[in-house]
Amino acid sequence: MIKKFFSGIGLLLLFVMAVAVAGTASWFFKHLNPELNLESSQVLEVAPGRSFISLLNQFEQEGVIATALPMRIWLRLNSDVAPIRAGEYRLESPLTLRELHRRMQAGEVITYRLTLLEGWTFREFRRALAQAEKLEAVTAEWSEAEIMEAVGMPGEAAEGWFFPDTYTYHKGMRDLDLLRLANRRMRQLLEEVWDTRQAGLPYRNAYDALIMASIIERETGAPHERRDISGVFVRRLHKGMRLQTDPTVIYGMGERYQGRITRSDLREATPWNTYVIRGLPPTPIAMPGEAALRASVDPAEGETLFFVARGDGTHQFSRTLEEHNRAVREFQLNRREGYRSWPAAPDNQGAGGGENE
């Protein structure tokens, strides 16, 4: 009888212990991965070096989770777990604790986008960088020479050397990080494009192609015209003719340009004014996109030497000065309402044409 009694007690104790263990395990796993109690979407900023355990304590104090103990135990038992990454994280329901931990380990931070447009000058690039949300502006007071040294091109002019595109970044990144990325992309692309160039182009090196691409970029926004524009300029260079393109005049005017150029502006001897100088200007006049770069080394064949803006964003191409002058009279001297020549200024005619005061 006594043996049976103690045997029954033992079985009862084992049953109670099993129930307790099961209950504890159930409680543990329930609170190991709870859904966060979030009243609304919010942004959590994690400082460099902060641990997930410290975040657990914060969540517990703020009532975001009922208890941090199970997750703390799990983290300490898994000492090889990757640390979380600094940055901004968006918290919104439904979101579990383990999913948040995974996102923080992967660095799935809030990102921002900055679009640097084709045809912008470097000055416009810098202005956009300075206004970008959550981007640290470390180069705001730097000179162009200091920036070029920082990107690994000391002594080079900045214009043209940064690829226009939409860039993604996160809080904590610097404008210098994006400048280095844009510069690296432009250098890689220019090298790739240069290797595909036509034979016999009037360029000394890839930099000349970059200069030409910047002029093409500023002359037309019509994709199908880029190679035709390139062909006109390449033929003019071969013949020793001046390029006579208004965007180079505008670039040389700098801040003085207010939407129109005059005959005196065309005669002003700036280093970039291709109505005055022969050959290419000394530097690019804007940041060209990939299409303009490829057009610069792959000009269309033909005999045209002139073009004039039609007023709808495209151009009329001509072989002779006589044809060109007729086109100027048709499209420039009798402008209709809504006339435009994008992306250059309204008075941009290109290759020697047009109405100027």
Image (cartoon, rainbow, N blue to C red):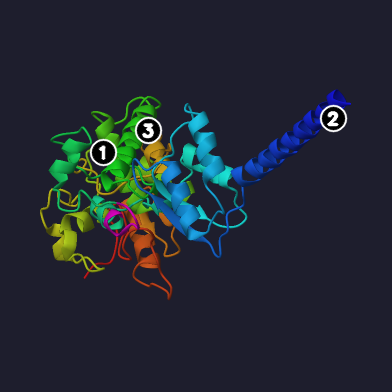
Q: Secondary structure at mark 2?
A: helix
- Point out the tag, 2 or 1, that comes first from the N-terminus: 2
Quarter of image, res 176: top left
Name the outermost residue toward the right.
Answer: 1
Image point (43%, 73%), residue name: 338
- Point out the tag, 1 or 3, that comes first from the N-terminus: 3
Q: Which residue is mark 1?
A: 237
Magenta span: 129-135
Image point (32%, 26%), residue name: 200
Residue 255 appears left or right of 87: left
| Three-letter amino acid code of the residue under disc 1 | Leu
Given residues 22 and 195, the one toward you in this image is 22
Looking at the image, residue 200 lies above or below residue 243:
above
Name the outermost residue toward the bottom.
Answer: 337
Residue 49 in sight from this viewpoint: yes
Q: Nearer the viewer, mark 2 or mark 1?
A: 2
Q: Nearer the viewer, mark 3 or mark 2?
A: 2
Q: Which residue is mark 2?
A: 5
| x and y, in percent, of residue 43 in the image | 45, 57
| x and y, in percent, of residue 25 in the image | 67, 38
| x and y, in percent, of residue 314 in the image | 44, 57
Residue 292 appears left or right of 142: right
| Three-letter amino acid code of the residue under disc 2 | Phe
Instruction: Estimate the spatial distance between the alpha carbons at disc 3 and disc 2, rounded to whole Å.
Output: 87 Å
| Three-letter amino acid code of the residue under disc 3 | Leu
Instruction: Estimate the spatial distance between the alpha carbons at disc 1 and disc 3, rounded to whole Å.
Output: 24 Å
Residue 326 appears left or right of 254: right
Which image quarter is the C terminus in? bottom left
Looking at the image, residue 321 lies above or below residue 5:
below
Q: Secondary structure at mark 3?
A: helix
Q: Which residue is mark 3?
A: 189
Instruction: Estimate the spatial distance between the alpha carbons at disc 2 and disc 1, rounded to whole Å.
Output: 111 Å
